[in-house]
Amino acid sequence: MVRHSRQRDAVLANLCSRYDHPSAEDIYLSLKPEMPAISLATVYRNLAQLESDGKIIRIGSGGTARYDGNISPHYHLSCLQCSGVVDVFMDDDCGICEKAAKVFDGTIISHSVLFTGYCSECSKKRG
């Protein structure tokens, strides 16, 4: 059993209040003023525990992991220009798990999709 932790609660609350898909360092810098004793290692440990508990999503993006407090089914787009990560909500998952299950000899329980392209701001700048 994992102990209750004030730092873990703070990491989760910080992440769930954001929509920018921050890195561990972003979360650390955001929490440091209110929790001067918190370390970057503590943030990483708590993010790993929260991910293991299914309370957050880890998004691989260009080598730097990003995190999302919204665990409802949705996808992400990693912007090739600004390196930002944005949510992509679709009405359904297009049956991707069912289609994959037909060609995979195993058990699929979930999936993760990361689109690459340009966010709306960068698309506007590109013309």
Image: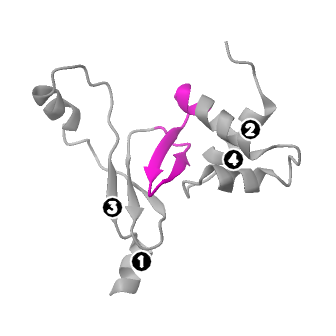
The disc, 2 or 3, on the residue closer to the chain's N-terminal end is: 2
Q: Does 7 sit left or right of 74 as displayed?
A: right
Residue denoted by label 1: 122
Q: Which residue is mark 3?
A: 116
Q: Which residues are magenta?
A: 50-71
Q: Write down the residue under mark 4.
A: 14
Q: Is residue 45 above or below residue 34?
A: above
Q: Quadrant of residue 123?
A: bottom left
Whether pointer 3 and pointer 4 mark residues with C-beta atoms closer than 8 Å, the reply is no
Q: Residue at x 27, y 25 (%)?
A: 108
Q: Mark 3 is on which residue type?
A: Thr
Instruction: Using residue 118 as the reference point, say whether residue 68 is left or right of it.
Output: right
- Mark 3 touching mark 1, by CB under 8 A? no
Residue in the image at 40% along x and 85% along y:
125
Secondary structure under badge 3? strand
Q: Which amino acid type is shown beneath numbered disc 2?
A: Thr
